[in-house]
Image (spheres, rainbow, N blue to C red):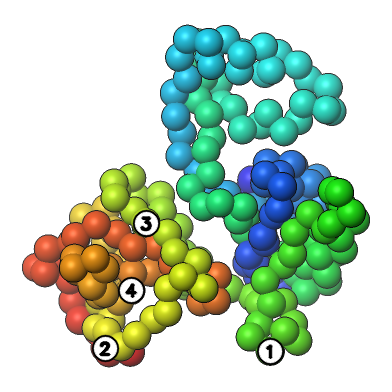
């Protein structure tokens, strides 16, 4: 969901429990906030197409979660999250406090429906630098096959060459060359939240810009 540009707003990462990421997308949208949910569009056929068409025909509040479907003429696509239980929201410091409160209020089975990621010392909500968010989105939306995602707990950055991609769909992206399962990959990170590893990129398309 897109919103107007507010200079005091920053990107934040939100973890959503109970498979309610589309519900949370609706809630944040109703709050007037811009969201980013990394998804892939999968065309539905047969029975899946028929069921999705029925749900799209229902417009009551209960079925708003079916915004996961997109209809383009006779074709229906399902939006499938690329990253389990994670959505990004652009909010001001005051608004992100409201988001956190809404997550606590939207309880399921007595538990909060999620949380906003905080800084390492847990003293404040962790704003994501625009550059990190722009590069992450560039990679995710590039259409490249073979992308793999790692949580902050699963993947720890070690020393490596920092590079910039010069050509191709990922031109302009900056990240680190890492060896993952014996293959050299480009790793782009949102620190403390998520990392995405691309498939192999030829050396001639890379410019080394530093070492971490």
Q: Viewed as shown, does residue 138 lie left or right of 25?
A: left
Q: Earlier in the sequence, mark 4 or mark 1?
A: 1
**Which label is found at residue 121?**
1
Q: Nearer the viewer, mark 2 or mark 3?
A: 3
Q: Position of residue 184 (x, y in %)?
A: 19, 69
Residue pointed to by mark 2: 210
Q: Earlier in the sequence, mark 3 or mark 1?
A: 1
Q: Viewed as shown, does residue 171 lie left or right of 99?
A: left
Asked if disc 3 and disc 4 are in contact, CB closer than 8 Å, the reply is no
Q: Is residue 51 above or below residue 208?
A: above
Q: Position of residue 63 (x, y in %)?
A: 77, 26
- Give the residue drawn at x 66%, y 82%: 119
The answer to whether residue 165 shows anywhere in this view is no
Label 4 environment density (alpha carbons within 10 Å; few <14, some 14–19, many ≥20): many
Give the quarter of the figure containing the C terminus.
bottom left
**Which label is found at residue 50?**
none
- Give the residue drawn at x 61%, y 14%: 51
Kindly state the secondary structure of the residue where label 4 is placed. Answer: strand
**Which label is found at residue 175?**
4
Cα distance, mark 2 to mark 3? Answer: 24 Å
Label 1 environment density (alpha carbons within 10 Å; few <14, some 14–19, many ≥20): few
Cα distance, mark 4 to mark 2? Answer: 10 Å
Cα distance, mark 2 to mark 1? Answer: 28 Å
Q: Earlier in the sequence, mark 4 or mark 2?
A: 4
- Give the residue drawn at x 69%, y 17%: 55
Give the quarter of the figure containing the N terminus.
top right
Q: Earlier in the sequence, mark 3 or mark 4?
A: 3
Residue pointed to by mark 3: 148
Label 3 environment density (alpha carbons within 10 Å; few <14, some 14–19, many ≥20): some
Q: Earlier in the sequence, mark 2 or mark 1?
A: 1
Cα distance, mark 3 to mark 1? Answer: 28 Å
């Amino acid at each position: 969901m897109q919103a107007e540009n507010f200079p005091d707003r920053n990107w934040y990462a939100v973890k959503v429990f109970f498979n309610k990421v589309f519900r949370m997308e609706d809630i944040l949208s109703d709050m007037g906030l811009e969201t980013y949910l990394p998804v892939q569009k999968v065309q539905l056929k047969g029975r899946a197409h028929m069921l999705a068409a029925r749900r799209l025909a229902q417009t009551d509040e209960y079925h708003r979660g079916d915004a996961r479907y997109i209809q383009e003429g006779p074709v229906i696509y399902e939006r499938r999250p690329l990253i389990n239980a994670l959505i990004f929201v652009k909010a001001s410091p005051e608004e992100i406090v409201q988001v956190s409160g809404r997550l606590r209020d939207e309880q399921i089975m007595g538990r909060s429906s999620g949380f906003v990621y905080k800084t390492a010392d847990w003293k404040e909500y962790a704003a994501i630098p625009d550059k990190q968010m722009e590069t992450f989105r560039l990679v995710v939306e590039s259409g490249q096959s073979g992308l793999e995602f790692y949580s902050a707990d699963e993947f720890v950055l070690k020393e490596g060459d920092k590079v910039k991609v010069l050509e191709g769909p990922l031109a302009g992206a900056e990240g680190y060359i890492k060896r993952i399962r014996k293959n050299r990959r480009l790793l782009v990170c949102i620190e403390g939240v998520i990392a995405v590893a691309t498939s192999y990129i030829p050396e001639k398309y890379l410019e080394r810009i530093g070492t971490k």
